[in-house]
Image (tube, rainbow, N blue to C red):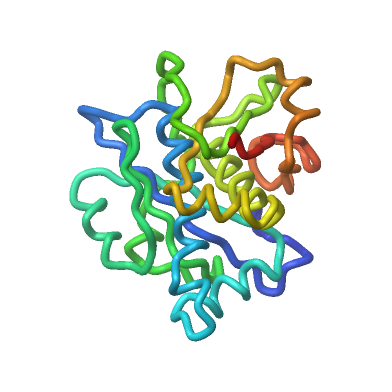
Amino acid sequence: MRPDYDPLDDPPWAMQLVVRAEKADPPGHDAACEAAATAVVRLLADPRVTEPEGEWRAAVHEWESRRIRKVTRRARGIRWPEVQVLPGVTVAHAGAEVRAFVPGPVSDVPSELAKLQVAGLDLAEEEPKPPPEPPYAAIALNPDVTMTTGKAAAQCGHAAQLLLRQAGRKDAAAWTEAGARVHLTRDVPWRRCVKHATVAVRDGGFTEVPPGTMTAIAWIVR
């Protein structure tokens, strides 16, 4: 049985995320996670998804009818411009560049993406940065769970997606209209964050962590 098989998906679909990670100047861990989360939300809030006749609408609906699944890959050199031709949204943030792609079946990933490495993306953590001006999404990762940057970026993407779908309409609209900014918070104790959070991500357990693990939480700061 394939490690990415989900018995509740027939067939499984995923949103691919690609982090630009050049050898000479890789981004930081937090910046990559924040950029990934913003890219996911900007894609989901794009008129090509939200408008009734939007060209990406059907694919996103098909994907969201299943379990949330995202795959983080890394690209460097010529591989990065190669993937820009595929439908998606690129976000540049704090030295990181991440592109979120229109979802599709995991068995039919475009060749430009399929050739990119999935495992092993682990970037150095930076010094904490101040949050942006509100409104923004605060995301916290569970400090008791060890995750690579690739895994953490996917979890931040999950948290941002759930927040977009479950936050109040006015809050979500204000957040997306302001650019869907995201701040990975580390200065608030995890238990306090959990009590304050609007959404929580519990992992499916296909990679790195046991199923049901609470990996990330999120809320909108107004």
Residue in the foreground of this view, choosing between 102 and 170: 170
Residue 130 sits above or below residue 6 on the image: above
Residue 2, horizontal then vertical, whole percent? 65, 58
Q: Position of residue 136 (x, y in %)?
A: 52, 38
Quadrant where the C terminus lies? top right
- Residue at image x 62%, y 54%? 170
Relative to 17, 192 lies left or right:
right
Instruction: Give residue 31's position: percent from left, percent from top.
Output: 41, 31
Q: Is residue 1 visible?
A: no
What's the residue at 69%, 52% (across, down)? 168
Which residue is pictured at 25% across the width and 36% down the height? 22
Q: How many marks?
A: 0
Q: Position of residue 172 (x, y in %)?
A: 60, 52
Seen as rendered, the residue at the extreme bottom is 53
181 with respect to 212 (left or right): left
Residue at 23% in and 28% down? 25
- Quadrant location of residue 190? top right
Image quadrant assignment for residue 6: bottom right
Residue 150 shows in this picture: yes
Q: Quadrant of residue 220?
A: top right
Q: Quadrant of the N terminus?
A: bottom right
Residue 167 vertical position relative to residue 44 in the rendered view, above or below: above
Decide which of 159, 137 is in the foreground and name it.
137
